[in-house]
Image (cartoon, rainbow, N blue to C red):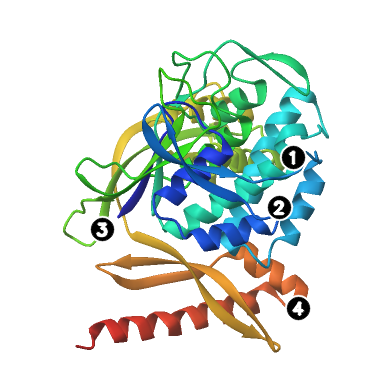
Amino acid sequence: MRLLILDSFHGAAGDMVTGALLDCGADRELVLRAMRAVVAEPAISQVTRAGIRALKVDTRATPVHRTFDEVMQRLDGAAASVPAPALAMARRVFERIRNAEEQVHGARAHFHEVGADDAIADIVGACTALHALQADGVKVLPVTTGHGTATGSHGTFPIPAPATALILKNAGLTATEGDHAGELCTPTGAALLAEFAATGAPAYAAHTILAVGYGAGTRDPHHAPNVLRAMLVETSGTGNGLEEDTVDILETNVDDVSGEVIARAITRFMEAGARDASATPIIMKKGRPGFLIRVIALPETSPALAELMARELGTLGVRCIPAVHRFIAERMIDEVEVTIRQTTRKMPYKCGLIRGEVYTLKAEFEAAKDWAEEQGMTVRDVIRAVEEAARDRCKKQQGAAKRP
């Protein structure tokens, strides 16, 4: 299994993430094409930071600030140049930022710096680069935030910035101040790391490093390299065609929570890094109907998710079944050309593999839903067309691989 490890030992910003992934081997032209859909031609240069060679990304964007809705419109306008899975991920990154900004400043908060074109381009570029690397999961090591104070659109604020702190909290990411005064992790960088971490990373020990990349920040302090490191590694398997993983199972019973609240809570759990979340109808004491809420979490995120369960559901206790062993199949997200009503489009799908053979595949729902709305069709028909095309593609690939 290919795993991406992100080590933000000197913080993280959007341009640093994009630079590190490009330096790690992401398709440069694919990333630049995606970024050019938002800004003019970005500049990529090789620099050194405290003696470490790294890639520096400069979007050359104008300082235009936008609302969340305006940012979404900018992303919609870039759809033709950005792979569908990357674009969907970019939208989720901005949703994380919006949720944090509204918690800090109230509803309909203005995005200011994180709504500028350079932030949009950095997020689109980083998500496209991750898509290009085709990693099966992302492991984010402790995030260095810096300390002290900084100045922005809302005046002087403590470090980490309020939005940054909430994004890291909501995602259950581990953070450390580090030794450097100043803002090392921006809200954009935090939201990218949070979304990348949500893809999951299996427990691993032995691994082979395939590539190492460094993304540079603007400053060049002499005492520490202002870079973010990315490592693409191949983890060792189990020998039975499935990868191994350990997770915690969090459970609680509720009988006084509405379906709307439960639905919203499950969404929040997934946003915060849960591997899965579900609600099952049960009969509780005294014959009362209720729900068993179950959340599958990585061991390092289960304490934060248990607290989130208590807050969202109002429950007084959460059971934890720790370190449950599980087997997981290798998975891959790919695209296939599909033609519907004389219109051809590349559509994303996810497939599961055992010993290199595809045994299950599924169209990505959001992309299928959007195309169904454009074509005036049912989403079931679009999903069927995507999956049929994907199966044909997989059969041809596997047939070619078997031929001598």
* Front: mark 2 or 3: 2
* Residue holding disc 1: 115
Q: Amino acid at mark 1?
A: Gly
Q: Give the distance between the C-alpha atoms of the residues marked 1 and 4, in whole angstroms.
A: 31 Å
Measured as percent of width and height from the top left, residue 355 is found at 24, 67
Foreground label between 3 and 1: 1
Name which quarter of the figure residue 309 lies in. top right
Pick the residue in front: 391 or 23. 23
> Real-space Cα distance between discs 2 and 4?
29 Å
Helix, strand or loop under label 2 = loop
The residue positioned 79% from the left and 54% from the top of the image is 73
**Left or right of 170, for residue 296:** left
Instruction: Please indicate whether residue 250 sits to the left or right of residue 34 in the image.
Output: left
Instruction: Find residue 9 and report its horizontal and vertical position in percent.
Output: 41, 27
151 in relation to 377, above or below: above
Which residue in the structure is indicated by mark 2?
A: 39
Residue 17's tag is none
State the CA–CA distance, disc 3 to disc 1.
Answer: 42 Å
Mark with earlier residue (2, 4): 2
* Closer to the eye: label 4 or 3: 4
For the point 53% across and 62% down, which residue is it?
Answer: 29
Mark pair 1, 2: CA separation: 13 Å
As drawn, the label of residue 375 is 4
Mark earlier in primary sequence (4, 3): 3
Identify the residue under disc 3.
242
Mark 1 surroundings within 10 Å by alpha-carbon count, few (fewer than 14), some (14 through 19), many (20 or more): many
How far across and down, in percent of the image, does residue 72 sit?
75, 51
